Amino acid sequence: MRKRSAQLLVVLVLLLTVGSAALAQKKVLDFLWFTDGIEGEVLKQIIADYEELHPDIEINIIEVPFQNLRTRLQTMIAGGTPPDLARLVNVGDFAPALLDLTPYLGLEYIEDFVPSTHRNVVIDGKLMAVPMDVTANGIIYNKDYFAQAGVEVPQTPEEAWTWEEFIDKLQIVVANSPARFGLAYDFTFHRWLTLLYQAGGQLFTDDWKAIAINSPAGERAIEYFVELHDKNIIPRSIWLGGENPNTLFRAGLTAAHWCGNWMLTNYRDNIDNFEWGVMYMPYEARRSSVLGGKYIATFKDAKYPEEAVEFIKYFTSQEVNARFCRDSLFISPRLDNAQLDYEFGAEMFEIFSNELAVSPPVAGSDWAHPFAGRIGDDFREIIVEALQHELTPREAVEKMERVGNAILEEYMN
């Protein structure tokens, strides 16, 4: 009996030893992550599939609130223990610590992604990250009101209205429907930038060292925005009174809402009293949206940088990225994923994707500038001064140039 017990003990020890050795061989990659909605659960499913394909790899998600991401990552980098993978919103902030992906993926890898993402991830000629998902500005409209007014929205990009046609159409809808105003417009500088790009302008110079908004295009964008308010197309209560544009549109007080694709799920869940959809945005000198998005990267000092690159390649491939964006109700940054089989609003997501596909590169790179947010707060207040006719459009862009360049000089010196 004692002999048999000893034999069983030996077998048990051997099994534990073999099991421990197998576990020791598994490489655990830390993935620093934040979640906006349901995409965290989608990511976990994709990781499970990847781990099944790669039994030697385990990916450990370290989830942090978005507002803590920057500080947490800076601390990890400073301590010499960066994660193997991270979800970023501003690649340039961490570029010195990132692994150059060019030797692994090639610079041509980014050519499969919408052009407005390129400058966000290609820094000093090196591919430092890959887009995961993107957001776009656009227009959601009240289908019932437009139908009552007999106004058909453009069905193709080629039929998109000019800025002046847009005003005319909205005035017709207001005159022939219960809408009190034509357009709710988000009170953010990011949303206003859409007009700047459509007018043919840009916020920063190409080298990112100075403000470029003091131009005929910048002046025209201010002038048009003032016109939209003076003609009562946009209610003054939003930009001059703090009223919520979402509330105005949901209540049927405006015929349309200039917002972003993230509002699709919000309105799906909160509007049941009218039909709504997405229209192509109007244009002046060119068509444009404004890019927002998230990126995936690894670090030079990561434990397993090469294994991290393999996951990045897998995650950003056409098939897997389509799954992530489709199931998360995001827009894919890949040009070959413009049409996804969404369970909701596929035709609306396609319009947002098209707007991004034709947006100029500055519509992404301007907002990737480290000081865009800081400058944007001041510029928004200058736009308010123009709306109150305290500044002419010319004076407004001149003031933006002075204020913006002073901020840049302060932070760069």
Image: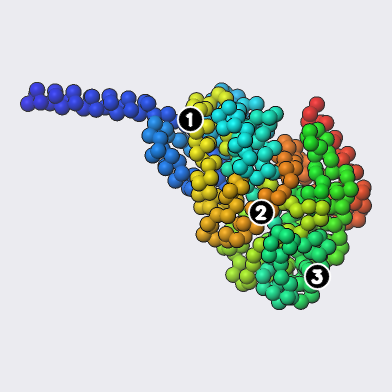
Looking at the picture, tell me which residue is in the foreground, 119 or 105.
105
Residue shown at 89%/48% (left/top)?
A: 216
Query: What is the secondary structure assignment of the residue under circle 3?
Result: helix
Q: Of the two numbered discs 1 and 2 on the same chain, state the one appearing first in sequence.
A: 1
Q: Which residue is mark 3?
A: 171
Q: Earlier in the sequence, mark 3 or mark 2?
A: 3
Q: Nearer the viewer, mark 1 or mark 2?
A: 2
Mark in front: 1 vs 3: 1
Of labels 3 and 2, the one closer to you: 2
223 displayed left or right of 325: right
Separation of disc 1 and disc 3 at Cα? 57 Å
- Residue type at mark 1: give it: Glu
Q: Amino acid at mark 2?
A: Asn
What residue lies at 67% left-to-right and 73% top-to-bottom? 144
Q: Which mark is residue 319?
A: none
Q: Please give the residue where the numbered disc 1 appears in the rendered image.
A: 307
Left or right: 289 as drawn, with respect to 167: left
For image coordinates 80% across by 44% down, the residue present is 202
Residue 168 is situated, as x and y percent measured from the top left of the image, at 82, 68
Instruction: Indicate the quadrant containing the C terminus: top left, top right, bottom left or bottom right.
Output: top right
**Mark 3 and mark 1 in contact (Cβ < 8 Å)?**
no
Left or right, 306 with respect to 131, comes to left
* Residue 354's disc number: 2
Q: Earlier in the sequence, mark 1 or mark 3?
A: 3
Dividing the picture into quadrants, the one containing residue 96 is: top right
Disc 3/disc 2 C-alpha distance (Å): 26 Å
As drawn, the residue found furthest toward the left would be 1
Is the C-beta separation of discs 3 and 2 under 8 Å? no
Residue 376, compared with residue 308, is above or below; it is below
**Callout 2 crowding tier (Cα within 10 Å): few <14, some 14–19, many ≥20:** many
**In front here: 289 or 21?**
289
